[in-house]
Amino acid sequence: MKFEKNILGIGAGYVGGPSMAMIACKCPAYKVTVVDIDPLRIAAWNSDDLPIYEPGLDAIIAATRGKNLFFSTDIEASIRENDIIFVNVNTPVKMFGVGAGMAADLQYWEKTARQILQHSRSSKIVIEKSTFPVKTALAMERILSNNKTIRFDVLSNPEFLSEGNAVNNMENPDRVLIGFRETENGIKARDILVEIYANWVPRERIIGSNIWSSELSKLVSNAFLAQRISSINAISALCEKTDADINEVAMIVGMDSRVGNKFLSVSVGFGGSCFKKDILNLVYLCRHYNLNEVADYWEGVIKINQYQQERFISNILNAMFNTITGKKICLLGFAFKADTGDTRESPAIFIARRLLEEQAEIVVSDPKALKNARADLAGVVGKVSYTEDPYEAVKDCHAIAVLTEWAIYRDLDFHKIYETMTKPAFIFDGRNILDHKRLFKIGFNVYPIGKPPLVHF
Ligand code: NAD
Ligand code: UGA
């Protein structure tokens, strides 16, 4: 069958897999190929056991794979055969040399650019979908311009999906952003990308900007979102000192339509592979331009996030008579948020490690993230066990710490749970998702975030 367009996605991770699958699903006339250097990941995409858990994704893969969506490890041939290339590779924080711990590690991206240069035999549109520091497109153009006989047009098209909600986010995006050069070729390339998205996204939501605004807007969008969480988490500390209730404060502040009520849920801290990394990147960029006050401002968002996690541990220690040595604590949830198995930068990792340092015994429970949790805690000294079943997990525990807002945790039979726990039984609700008054009535000592605790002694 002859396809209207041949599209390649390089990088088959949390962004590459779902976003390329969505294009295949919405555009049956296009052929979409997704490649990765990791053969195990590609094998998983080609199996019934997909490498990531994302609600609704199975159905999309089932409808497209083998028809117009293909997963492959043959990167070279795929570059040759496709003329529209999305770059979805990872951009982690650099852990060595200049910019260590702050700047983006661009080695994966650069290798990709060089591979595209080496294996292309015809002109290509290269689209940055990964989150890159400002001016990456320029570096990409410079590498690609080493081939004088082929044209490469570089566009920025950052992805705004959030995990656990990716299918809906991609189906109904708030906006699709395309950064392009205001040249004849730049505009032509933009129009080709607009044509792809226009298959399902209303035109008015497909917006254009210059490439540098596009790259920067992605970092700033994540920084603003994370800043809201750190703002509400910072106020939760004040609520705990003043007997104010953070849920009430968040509701009242959020009712101001200028502020809005989204992203004001108090938590044990934000996690995920991107917020911290992207803010560090922004901070690095500001320091590079000698904007130290601006850098300090954004660094504060990360500091509060760390503070919130440390506070959670201090609250556990204080409440449990300043010692948890030998006590058994159940972590309900390990994923960085509900509806994903992803644990990258999950506050649960820090909390688990700190509890183990205090020589507590921990039981980790999560409906989707146990495989990743095991890898995250591999080699950590201390007693750790894992079980998906929350009722099994809480048996004989002195305390429960709710770390992920999985819906199933709201509906647990806490009477039954209380019966099986060591007394006095404690609950630390790191997400404020439980019915605290009811738990208190059952007999628990309840420690929400940013609210007065409910204790029996
Ligand atoms: P990921 O680690 O899950 O996936 C990246 C994939 O790229 C990996 O499978 C890796 O093997 C592959 N890869 C690396 N170098 C390669 C190369 N040279 N050739 C082929 N494959 C290569 O990362 P992710 O979470 O999908 O994030 C990718 C990018 O998207 C990052 O820049 C991230 O900031 C951004 N982003 C992520 C999310 C999210 O929710 N995870 C959302 C928006 C944007
Ligand atoms: C986030 C952004 O929401 C996406 O728009 C962006 O594309 C993505 O980062 C990215 O660039 O990787 P994601 O990290 O998947 O998406 O998930 P979020 O829903 O943003 O949650 C991030 C963290 O903040 C989670 O740990 C979550 O539990 C926490 N959170 C979120 C809160 O603590 N309170 C809230 O009110 C909202």
Image (tube, rainbow, N blue to C red):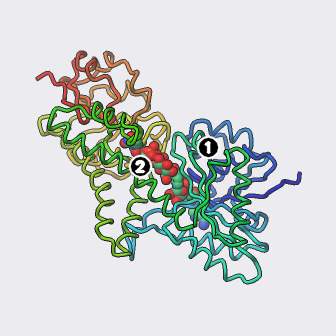
Which residue carries the number 1 mark?
50
As drawn, the label of residue 225 is 2
Number of disc labels: 2
Is residue 76 among the parts visible in the rendering? yes
Q: Is residue 45 above or below residue 285?
A: above
Crowd band around label 2 with a 10 angstrom C-alpha radius: few (<14), some (14–19), many (20+): some
Ranked by sequence position, the earlier of labels 2 and 1 is 1
- Give the image location of residue 148, x and y in percent: 73, 84
> Which amino acid, mark 2?
Leu
> Which amino acid, mark 1?
Leu
Seen at 33% across and 75% down, the residue is: 290
Is residue 330 among the parts visible in the rendering? no
Q: Relative to residue 228, is residue 174 drawn left or right?
A: right
Residue toward you, 382 or 299? 299
Quarter of the picture holding the C terminus: top left
Q: Relative to residue 396, is residue 321 drawn left or right?
A: left
Is the CB–ligand 1 distance for label 1 below 8 Å? no
Residue at disc 1, secondary structure? loop
Is the CB–ligand 2 distance for label 2 below 8 Å? yes
Q: Is residue 278 above or below residue 174?
A: below
